[in-house]
Image: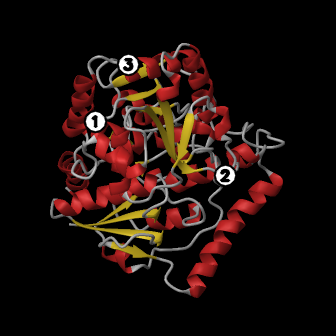
Amino acid sequence: MKVTLINTSDAGGGAPAACLRLLKALRSQNMDARLLVQYKKTAEDGVDAVVKGAWSKLKARFNFLYERLPFIFFHERDKSVRFAFSTANAGTSIKNNKLIKEADILHLHWTNSGFLSIADLKELVDTGKPIVWTLHDMWAFTGGCHYAGTCDFFTHECGDCYFLRGSSPNDISHTGWMRKAAMYSGNKNITFVACSAWLAGVAQKSPLLKDFNVTSIPNPIDTNVFSPQDKLNMREEWGINPFARVVLFGAANINDRRKGINYLVEALNRFNTHCPDSNLVEVVIFGKNKHFDVKQIPFKVIELDLITLPEELAQVYNLADVFVLPSVEDNLPNTVMEALACGTPVVAFNVGGIPEMVVHGENGYLAEFESANDLAKGIHEMLYAENVAELAANARNKVLKDFNNAKVAQQYMDVYRSILK
């Protein structure tokens, strides 16, 4: 059985990281799996790129701009939603790629940013090959948004989209929804897999997927890389006060509206009003930061920029006392799983797939949705917990039990075998 995974890239965000981890997990179980990407950014075996020369790189760049610029100039409501909606109007046909032709199963992941258009996706569907489509967000069953927030228009036919300027019943969200309906029509060879039970439940509400099987399998993680390490050694390695109480926050892009950094700022300011030793609290932040002013945070801040090496990322989780992720929309964020695997308790809002990883009071704190006050309470409880060792052990054991490579790979292999019967 040959499986070709398909993703825009193999690094540079949550979906690329999760997809590459799945590739390694499958190959560790002797699965004949390859990953086809638009851009290859790692040196990992089993990954092949569509972009290999100057011409293909130029074409890929054109496709990205051809999709983005019309949206920016004519449709986006404001800059905050610039990458929250993808039209998938431009892309590259890959139906004749060797990895596509040789595959018994095509396994789609995240293919936006000018990699595959809806027309390109339909070409893959029309090959008749069985397709597994892992949902890293909501895009596959909406008119174009990656997360719908409180909007439920995707349960109808979209339209009047609040991401758009001058929205109307027949705006590009509606036409996008209809294009996907046409792509799925008459095709029963797709099995959808959501990374969380939460997202699977949301997906099943969309009429676009009503005739398809939708199941849930989490992302895997290498628990040998993301594992507990000596906290004092890690702090010395990264220049962090060994006596400090360290709060960690991070994301690929910390300014992403979904990651809720404004709630973190408010929560830390509230926490500061009753913190018994504020001079010993330090906040460590990792991830791309274009415009966030760390002076809004009332404690000493150490910025680490974007960390790409998993081994270094594991060290950063290990130097912290608590990882805080105040996301207002999220599927199954890698950062939460990574922190838990390193034995670091997590404080987060009770939203999306996060409760499938964080068990309130056992390995972290689930705060009331969008309550900075409760988030502050969670930070306080985790920083000053008396059962630190128990929290750390519970965090690690949750990942070992539910998200290890072998278990997740086996779940996907069961899906593959079931659709080839």
Q: Secondary structure at mark 2?
A: loop
Marks 2 and 3 close (CB-CB < 8 Å):
no
Determine the CA span between mark 2 and mark 1.
Answer: 30 Å
Q: Nearer the viewer, mark 2 or mark 3?
A: 3
Q: Residues within 10 Å of mark 2 (few under 14, many from 20)?
A: few
Residue 35 position, x and y percent, is: 36, 67
* Horizontal arrangement in the rendering, residue 177 relative to residue 344 (left or right): right
Q: Secondary structure at mark 3?
A: loop
Above or below for 212 versus 22: above
* Res. 214 in view: no
Kind of residue at badge 1: Gly
* Horizontal arrangement in the rendering, residue 374 relative to residue 359 (left or right): right
Q: Which residue is mark 3?
A: 384
* Horizontal arrangement in the rendering, residue 66 relative to residue 255 (left or right): right
Determine the CA span between mark 1 and mark 3.
Answer: 16 Å
Classify residue 127 by image quadrant: bottom left
